[in-house]
Image: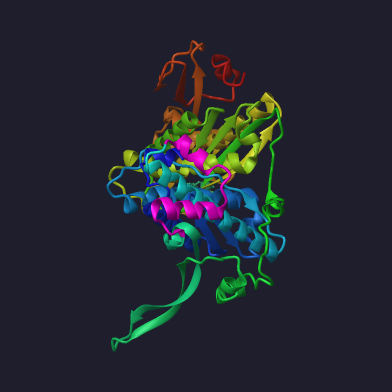
Amino acid sequence: MRFSDIHDLEKPNDEKALALMNSCAAAVLEEYPDIVFSYGFNDEYSFVFKRKTKFYQRRASKIMSLIVSFFSSVYATKWKEFFPHKEMKCPLSFLARLLCCASLEVLQAYLAWRQNECHIRNLHNTCLWMLIKSGKSAKEAVEVLQGTQKQEKNELLFQQFGINYRMLPEIFRQGSCIFMMQAEDVVKYDEHGNPIKRMRRRPRMIHNEHIAGQNFWNGQQYLLMELGPFENDIKKIKAAYVRSFLFENKLMPSTWIVIRIDGCHFHRFSEVHEFEKPNDQQALNLMNSCAVAVLEEFKDIVFSYGVSDEYSFILSKDSKFYQRQASQIVSVIVSFFSSVYVMKWKDFFPFKELKFSPSFDGRAVCYPSTEILRDYLAWRQVDCHINNQYNTCFWMLVKSGKSKSEAQSYLKGTQTREKNELLIRQFNIDYNTLPEMFRRGSSVFRIKGEDSTMPKNGTFGDAKEKIITDHSNIIEDAFWKEHPSILS
Ligand code: GTP
Ligand code: MG
């Protein structure tokens, strides 16, 4: 809602915004071949995986977070294609839920439910906005529509505004389905100039009034093959029945919630974008800047720690954020982070084009005590140290002429002290003088007004709290003593 207001999207439907959503969904289908079918309207999209998918061993959080992250990142990437004259002013995030359909009938009931929602909401919003555009206040318009049935809304549109609802664009009334279809493509030409054709899978968009109907569904070869036929038509919408299959994972009360996100295939992402090895200052600054944006947006996050392509966000013990539903908290944070990453890319890499949309996976873990939470953070910082020290040696050896496998066997079994000596002896590098951000990772956190600590750098906002980026040792007590309010 807020996003559409800020960007002045047309009410009740913005064709370009819908086309952008559809384009993102098509990108998701191309990226993840296990997705068989998708359906979307307004600001939501549903993706249906094939029954026997082994995608990430069917780990719920991984699947859900990757899809929502990729979708958000593509959305931010493609924004300018659809709105060339409108800047994307703020990041967006999507909530994602997972639903396991025990049978094809549940899937059918789910699709019927979502398409019915599309219809009900669109009819309501069309009436609402026509009333508002004709001079009524939002409150008056709501009162006019209170308790009205479909038939009455249709009549209101026709009589007061001369609109025949059935003549409005299908995409508004019916939503959009996108699924893969076989299409013949010319891949190249032979020496005689004859086209060589191959069958390729391509996402195709279809609008249909009854996506959950036998007629539509059983008429699609591809859906029949991947999912099977619908046996009967659905007579009644069974929303409560469908909801009972929703995968809910409520996080334990009174525990610290850690949401850890991790870049997907960042090995490749960093290669393609030619990140400096082993550490790219700008890439790390970009990650930190995204973390600052996340803390600004989600007030329940008290602390975050990041290294390489990962970030851990800690929510306060008593947080009631999304009633502590894991999928909602993970999806909203990971999708927000992804869209910020794309939006800020240019600020950090003004001369590098973003070649494809990055995605992050996310998971939620609860820690019952401050002590265990600190163990977790210490584990991440130790990991940062071990990896960074190894990578620094490895890349120095490679840059000095060793092959990657030579460098690897050279370092095998070496201890911290030996690696430090190697750096000094062979490359005249004192490991302890390398930038703190590389050696210790980054902490982004808020300190409250009453906290007397002056930030080394940070945003002052309206002085009540400051968000700080810092590279301290978070394993030792000193840091936590200096900032007692963080985990209080
Ligand atoms: P998944 O997370 O399993 O999808 O694989 P991944 O390729 O993202 O690997 P992983 O998360 O284990 O490790 C992160 C990878 O990102 C590293 O192995 C590096 O290849 C790359 N990476 C992260 N930060 C930097 C950086 O500053 N410079 C360079 N050159 N690479 C980086
Ligand atoms: Mg990764």
In the displayed structure, would residue 162 be above or below residue 286? below
Q: Nearer the viewer, residue 339 or 447?
A: 339
In the displayed structure, would residue 191 be above or below residue 183? below
The answer to whether residue 196 of the structure is visible from this angle is: yes
In the displayed structure, would residue 46 be above or below residue 192? above
Q: Nearer the viewer, residue 40 or 14?
A: 14
Q: Name the residue rendered at 40%, 45% in the picture.
A: 342
On the image, the x and y values in percent for residue 159 come to 43, 53
Task: Specify the segment rendered in magenta.
Answer: 137-165
Q: Residue furthest front?
A: 159
| Residue 119 located within the stretch drawn in magenta | no
On the image, the x and y values in percent for residue 280 come to 39, 40
Q: Which quadrant: the C terminus?
A: top right
Quarter of the figure with residue 375: top right
Magenta-colored segment: predominant secondary structure: helix
Q: Name the residue rendered at 52%, 42% in the picture.
A: 334
Quarter of the figure with residue 7: top left
